[in-house]
Amino acid sequence: SHALRLWGSGPSVWHKNYPVAQGNRQSPIDIVPHQALHDPSLGPVVLNYDQCTSMNITNNGHSVVVQFDDSDDRSVIQGGPLDNPYRLKQFHFHWGEKGCHGSEHTVAGNSYASELHLVHWNAVKYKTFGEAATAPDGLAVLGIFLETGDDHRWLHVITDALYMVKFKVSTTVNCFNPKCLLPSSLHYWTYLGSLTTPPLHESVIWIVLREPIIVSEKQLGKFRMLLFTGEEEDQRIRMENNFRPPQPLKGRKVRSSI
Ligand SMILES: O[B-]1(O)OCc2ccc(NC(=S)NCc3ccccc3)cc21
Ligand SMILES: [Zn+2]
């Protein structure tokens, strides 16, 4: 698909088209809990998600994305390391082809089966998502690890819709509130980083939750049957391993709310 050609054969060659790939605040990173600085001034993260701002689910050729109506402040994240509310724009997943590889961030060298990214943008300071996506404090992404175990009772709403977006297409999904995908504890690590996919803009305040959510192998399997390719293309490339490996910390400090 165009994304694969544009992005080359993967993370190791992205720097050719996107030199920022070798920048000083790239993501993901390996989070080492006992080296994180506990910052007592870090308050709780607050999520105010409206029931019905979800719009569609799309296979965009490199992940599956649920887009939200971000024309007002109905669904925002605030508090924690954030100076103002950030508007929910989309969420998407990264996963592997089997077992416990697939997350982007790792914790003391350990990776999880998958990672959910809830993407928000600073609509107080910037007029559009595109403008925010290139600003150092433009985006706030909540990262949630997925671990295999029992069925996740709400993830079904997403995984049952994936067969409709097997190829690079979009379909509507309404009234899905991603608050149902949060773990019970909102303890987090936070650091300044970037998009983990091209254009790799260094515009993300990362908030990574310590507690994973549990999903079943069967639910994860439905992500793995998605294709990078479009229906019209003859070669069928399964969408898996769409995660970037950890990048150098380059002196950054990771703070913890824990
Ligand atoms: O690194 B991530 O996978 O996790 C965090 C995150 C946030 C956003 C994206 N990409 C998007 S929204 N691209 C479209 C776009 C990018 C830049 C400007 C306009 C439009 C990927 C990731
Ligand atoms: Zn992501």
Image (cartoon, grey):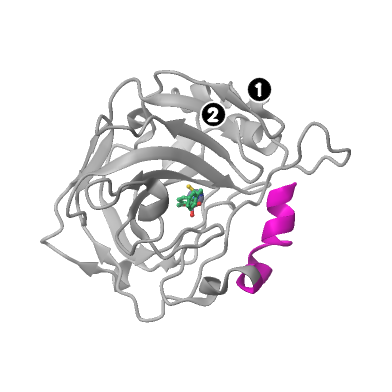
* Quarter of image, res 207: bottom left
* Quarter of image, res 47: top left
Image location (x, y in percent) of residue 121: 33, 47
Q: Is 63 in front, or is 158?
A: 63
* Image-based side of 179 in relation to 237, left or right: left
Most distant residue in the right direction:
234
Most distant residue in the left direction:
41
Q: What's drawn in magenta, residue-wise?
A: 1-16
Magenta region includes residue 253: no
Indicate the amino acid at tag 2. Answer: Ile
Assess disc 2: are there few (<14), some (14-19) or many (≥20) residues with their C-alpha within 10 Å of its C-alpha.
many
Most distant residue in the bottom direction:
251
Query: Mark 2 or mark 1, which is nearer the start of the sequence?
Result: 2
Taking the image as drawn, is residue 186 in sight?
yes
Indicate the amino acid at tag 1. Answer: Met
Most distant residue in the front direction:
127
Quick one: quadrant of the C terminus?
bottom left
Image location (x, y in percent) of residue 84: 18, 49
Give the residue pinned by disc 1.
164
Q: Residue at x 55, y 57 (%)?
A: 197
Image location (x, y in percent) of residue 223: 63, 35
Give the residue pinned by disc 2.
57
Q: Residue at x 34, y 76 (%)?
A: 252
